[in-house]
Image (spheres, grey):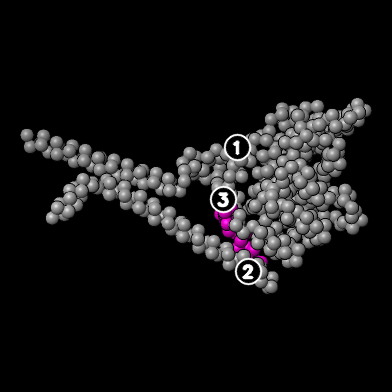
């Protein structure tokens, strides 16, 4: 009897607003449990795809790689990859070395996690694939892969330079050991190679740069501004814009250039004179490309992109200000901003490389937030359960307000009826 009375008393003190709150929080916790169950199910599927990478049938491996790529592009699964990276890496490398073109491309795309370990294990295999392979699509995928694993995994300039050199030998075959054996690259591969090389080159700004090491790059890229393919001209233009930002084409204005490495005044004077002459040549060509007329059948978008890029380069050299790019991620997330040539080149590369997965990574991948000026909505930083509870509290507040409004309306109605009766 007493227990029943106490339960009844407690029930009298437990009002409907508290019930609404508990119901909302319970719903939030249930949703969280469902999310966890979904994640466990997803990891089970990924384990199955990894097992399929050991199959002898190439089509089975291709399908598994495709599923893994989709999973990594659609979700930021860093913890899963950390636990499986050795297994994944071994199978990815086997696919690059022995698989079909499609399989090698998928494997190259899948390698982008677990930074330094993957870089140490894969760079030599990827570099060899660039030399031995002739398939254009496979070479493009390997170039992108090499750029990404080195960008994330390299810990010093020496490691970065190894990959830069391997990629440069694809762009400018005369710089490599197999000059007579190298065929001219298709324009699509050349544009990808320059884009990937420029992306990796953005990482050297933290080190002192010997200008003598970049004479060949400046000279060859300047000739590509006259290439017949517009995508090659644009890719070369972006690389040259980065040279201006790094001070390679403006030696006396840069904090990154180690001009003292040229330990003789004659060498210093010669380098300054050479870079000044190259700067004048490049700016003259940039001016032509910024106002190029389009002929019949010209792709207007590509032409406008070219004009816009080279006009921005001219403006940057004159004012020192790089145009800012703002990219809205979603209604719930903030803006991603690129305000330097370094950031612009990184943004363009990652959008192309990640494809449909870029938006998801821009929302959730902290690496991208560190690379750009990322302005995130304050509520996004809350944990999942905090966001669910926050929504629950918001629901409770709205419920209480609605009840209060109804109560006030009823009181006003009763007051109006009493007045009428009087």
What is the x, y in percent for residue 376? 52, 40
Regarding residue 295, the answer to whether it shows in the image is: no
Nearest to viewer (mark 2 / mark 1): 2
Q: Secondary structure at mark 2?
A: helix
The quarter of the rendered structure image containing the N terminus is: bottom left
Q: Do the numbered discs 3 and 2 sit on residues whose CB atoms are within 8 Å?
A: no
Q: Secondary structure at mark 3?
A: helix
Point 20% across, 50% down: residue: 11
Asked where in the image residue 255 lies, by quadrant, the reply is top right
Asked if the residue at tag 1 contacts the one at tag 2, i.e. Cβ–Cβ closer than 8 Å, the answer is no
What percent of the width, then of the height, locates residue 301?
A: 68, 46
Q: Which residue is mark 2?
A: 52
Residue at 36% x, 43% y is: 394
Number of other residues with Cα within 10 Å of mark 3, as a class: few under 14, some 14 to 19, many 20 or more: some
Q: Which mark is residue 360?
A: 3
Q: Earlier in the sequence, mark 3 or mark 2?
A: 2
| Label 2: how many Cα within 10 Å (few below 14, some 14–19, many 20+) | some
103 in magenta: no
Instruction: Tell me the magenta residue range.
Output: 62-80
Question: Looking at this view, is 231 or 207 the one in front?
Answer: 207
Mark 1 sits on what residue? 373
Most foreground residue, 234 or 388 = 388
């Amino acid at each position: 009897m007493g227990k029943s009375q106490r339960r009844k008393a407690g029930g009298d003190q437990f009002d409907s607003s508290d019930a609404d709150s508990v119901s909302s929080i319970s719903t939030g916790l249930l949703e969280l449990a469902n999310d966890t169950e979904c994640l466990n199910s997803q990891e089970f599927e990924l384990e199955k795809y990894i097992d399929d990478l050991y199959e002898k049938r190439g089509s089975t491996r291709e399908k598994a790689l495709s599923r893994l790529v989709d999973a990594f592009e659609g979700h930021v699964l860093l913890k899963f990859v950390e636990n499986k990276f050795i297994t994944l890496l071994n199978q990815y490398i086997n696919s690059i070395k022995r698989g079909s073109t499609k399989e090698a491309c998928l494997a190259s795309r899948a390698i982008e996690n677990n930074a330094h370990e993957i870089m140490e294990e894969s760079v030599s295999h990827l570099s060899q694939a660039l030399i031995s392979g002739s398939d254009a699509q496979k070479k493009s995928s390997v170039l992108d892969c090499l750029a990404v694993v080195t960008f994330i995994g390299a810990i010093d300039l020496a490691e970065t330079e190894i990959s830069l050199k391997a990629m440069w030998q694809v762009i400018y075959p005369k710089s490599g050991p197999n000059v007579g054996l190298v065929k001219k690259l298709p324009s699509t591969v050349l544009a990808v190679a320059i884009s990937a090389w420029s992306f990796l080159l953005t990482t050297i700004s933290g080190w002192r740069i010997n200008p003598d090491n970049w004479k060949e790059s400046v000279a060859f890229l300047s000739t590509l501004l006259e290439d017949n393919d517009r995508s090659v001209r644009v890719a070369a233009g972006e690389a040259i814009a980065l040279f201006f930002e790094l001070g390679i084409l403006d030696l006396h204005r840069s904090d990154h250039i180690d001009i003292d490495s040229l330990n003789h005044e004659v060498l210093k004077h010669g380098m300054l004179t050479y870079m000044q002459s190259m700067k004048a040549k490049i700016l003259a060509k940039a001016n032509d490309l910024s106002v190029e007329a389009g002929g019949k059948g010209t792709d207007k978008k590509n032409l406008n992109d070219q004009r816009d890029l080279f006009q921005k380069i001219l403006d940057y050299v004159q004012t020192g200000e790089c145009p800012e790019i703002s990219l809205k991620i979603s209604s719930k997330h903030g803006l991603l901003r690129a305000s330097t040539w370094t950031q612009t080149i990184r943004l363009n590369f990652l959008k192309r490389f990640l494809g449909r997965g870029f938006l998801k990574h821009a929302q959730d991948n902290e690496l991208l937030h560190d690379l750009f000026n990322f302005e995130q909505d304050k509520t996004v930083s809350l944990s999942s359960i905090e966001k669910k509870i926050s929504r629950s509290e918001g629901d409770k507040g709205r419920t209480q307000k609605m009840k209060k409004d109804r109560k006030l309306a009823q009181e006003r109605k009763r007051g109006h009826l009493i007045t009428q009766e009087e």
